[in-house]
Amino acid sequence: MDEREFADRADRTLTRLLDALEAALEGDDPDIELRGGVLTLDLDKAGQFVLNKHAPTRQVWLSSPVSGASHYAWDEAAAVWRSTRGPDRLEVRLAADLAAACGHPVNLGS
């Protein structure tokens, strides 16, 4: 994947996640912002989640107060962002961490 394709795919992913997070966490009073390729989600009771695109490695990085840091590379065959350290998918890990932090299931449409 070239740099432009990565940037487009990562931007579309972050925008889609922004919309999904706003819908899924409406009752949790989240502070969500997407700026410059960085999606920040602050939950008063749970801490801060940060997703960002990392162009040099062509990865999307997640920082979570629940599971720590993880990196995701595009899996062309499955058309998903997959962990560089195992089978986890980005949306699945994020939804699980948010559910643990919020105390209720979180559906990100993954």
Image: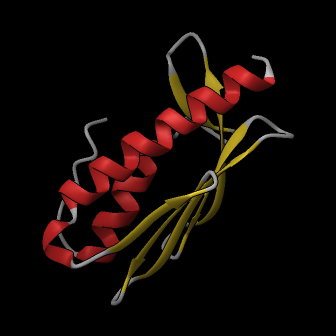
Indicate the position of residue 16 as horizontal and vertical percent values.
Answer: 38, 40
Question: How many marks can you see?
Answer: 0
Residue 98 visible in rendering: yes
Indicate the position of residue 100 as horizontal and vertical percent values.
Answer: 32, 70
Q: Is residue 59 left or right of residue 24?
A: right
**Residue under the point 34% across and 75% down:** 101
In the displayed orientation, state which residue is furthest to the left: 27
**Residue under the point 55% across and 38% down:** 11
Residue 89 visible in rendering: no
Res 67 → quadrant = bottom right
**Residue under the point 52% across and 76% down:** 65
As displayed, is residue 77 above or below residue 62? above
In the displayed orientation, state which residue is furthest to the front: 36
Q: Quadrant of the C terminus?
A: top left
Q: Nearer the viewer, residue 31 or 70?
A: 31
Q: Is residue 102 left or right of residue 18?
A: left
In the displayed orientation, state which residue is furthest to the bottom: 45
Q: Is residue 101 left or right of residue 57?
A: left
Indicate the position of residue 48 as horizontal and vertical percent values.
Answer: 49, 78
Q: Quadrant of the N terminus?
A: top right
In the displayed orientation, state which residue is furthest to the right: 56
As displayed, is residue 16 above or below residue 8? below
Q: Nearer the viewer, residue 85 or 42?
A: 42
Which colour assignment does the render follow?
A: secondary structure
**Residue under the point 62% across and 39% down:** 86
As displayed, is residue 91 above or below residue 30? above
Indicate the position of residue 89 as horizontal and vertical percent values.
Answer: 49, 38
